[in-house]
């Protein structure tokens, strides 16, 4: 009888942990193949610098930039809260000259109308000798209507920022979303590196979360945590 009761209790604990991860309560999320959906990217699992990581590379057939090139997590519905993940990017051997190690997150992904918000980093810009490039180390964009080039032209400096970073190192991205505002914190910094006060799809939108890369990037993701508020 005691054995049966113990097994029953353990099964309840297992269910609780599984449901918590699926409903996003702040527990670390396991990046397993069955809960990931690649979109215009390839993915694989590797051990890198002591971490079990998800490797993501953009499909070479996608020539445009700031496209929905991400791995989306199944079963996630995110409106407000926090997305935290460690990222590391390298340049592919055949990366074009414009490659910057683009890597970040997409959120509030709406598959019905192919829209989402995104914040990403350009690690090669963090220590560039050109100050203008340094100022473009971090980027916000909104798909499909507000890609980086339109935002840079219409509102220069508002949706980009500088922060120290480089390739081939783990960088912790923490994106805090509240209604129409999103803030990006890097590593253990107490102040945000980027603040966006007018997310283009508005305050009431919700949707999935994706791990995003762009052209020329070999991107790695680990230690993902998502918390809904």
Image: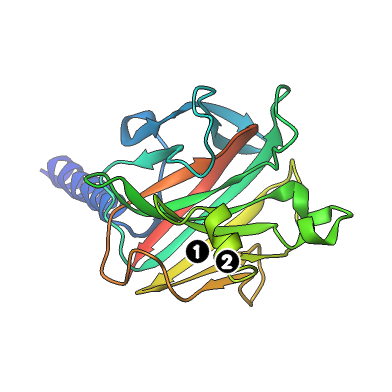
Name the quarter where the N terminus is drawn: top left
The image quarter containing residue 71 is top left
Residues at circles 2 and 1 in contact by the CB criterion of under 8 Å: no
For residue 208, side relative to residue 224 (left or right): left
Q: Mark 1 points at which residue?
A: 175
User: What x and y, as percent, mark residue 43?
Assistant: 48, 27
For mark 2, does the 10 Å Cα neighbourhood hold few (<14), some (14 to 19), or many (20 or more) residues?
many
Q: Depth check: 5 or 29 in front?
A: 29
For mark 1, does the 10 Å Cα neighbourhood hold few (<14), some (14 to 19), or many (20 or more) residues?
many
Above or below, 97 against 196 in this view is: above
Q: Name the residue under label 2.
A: 159
For residue 141, side relative to residue 78 (left or right): right
Callout 2 secondary element: loop
Above or below, 50 against 44 in this view is: below
User: What x and y, as percent, mark residue 138?
Assistant: 64, 59
Q: Residue furthest left?
A: 1
Residue depicted at 83% across the width and 54% down the height = 127
Callout 1 secondary element: strand
Q: How far apart, in angstroms, are the residues tagged by discs 2 and 1?
A: 14 Å
Look at the image and tell me whether residue 173 can be seen.
Answer: yes
Above or below, 34 against 14 in this view is: above
Residue depicted at 46% across the width and 41% down the height = 67
């Amino acid at each position: 009888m005691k054995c049966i009761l113990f097994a029953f209790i353990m099964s309840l604990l297992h269910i609780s942990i599984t449901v918590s991860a699926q409903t996003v309560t702040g527990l670390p999320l396991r990046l397993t193949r069955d809960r990931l959906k690649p979109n215009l990217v390839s993915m694989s699992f590797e051990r890198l610098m002591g971490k079990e990581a998800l490797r993501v590379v953009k499909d070479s057939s996608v020539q445009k930039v700031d496209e929905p090139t991400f791995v989306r997590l199944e079963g996630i519905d995110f409106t407000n809260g926090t997305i935290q993940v460690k990222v590391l990017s390298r340049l592919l051997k055949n990366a074009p000259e414009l490659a910057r190690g683009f890597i970040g997150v997409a959120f509030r992904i709406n598959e019905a109308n192919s829209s989402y918000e995104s914040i990403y980093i350009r690690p090669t810009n963090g220590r560039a000798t050109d100050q203008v490039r340094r100022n473009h180390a971090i980027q916000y964009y909104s798909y499909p209507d507000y890609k980086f080039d339109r935002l840079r032209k219409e509102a220069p400096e508002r949706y980009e920022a500088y922060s120290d970073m480089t390739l081939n190192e783990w960088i912790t991205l923490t994106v805090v979303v509240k209604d129409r505002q999103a803030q990006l914190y890097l590593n253990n910094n107490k102040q945000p590196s980027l603040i966006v006060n007018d997310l283009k799809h508005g305050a009431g939108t919700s949707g999935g979360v994706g791990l995003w890369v762009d052209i020329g990037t070999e991107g790695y993701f680990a230690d993902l945590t998502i918390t809904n508020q």
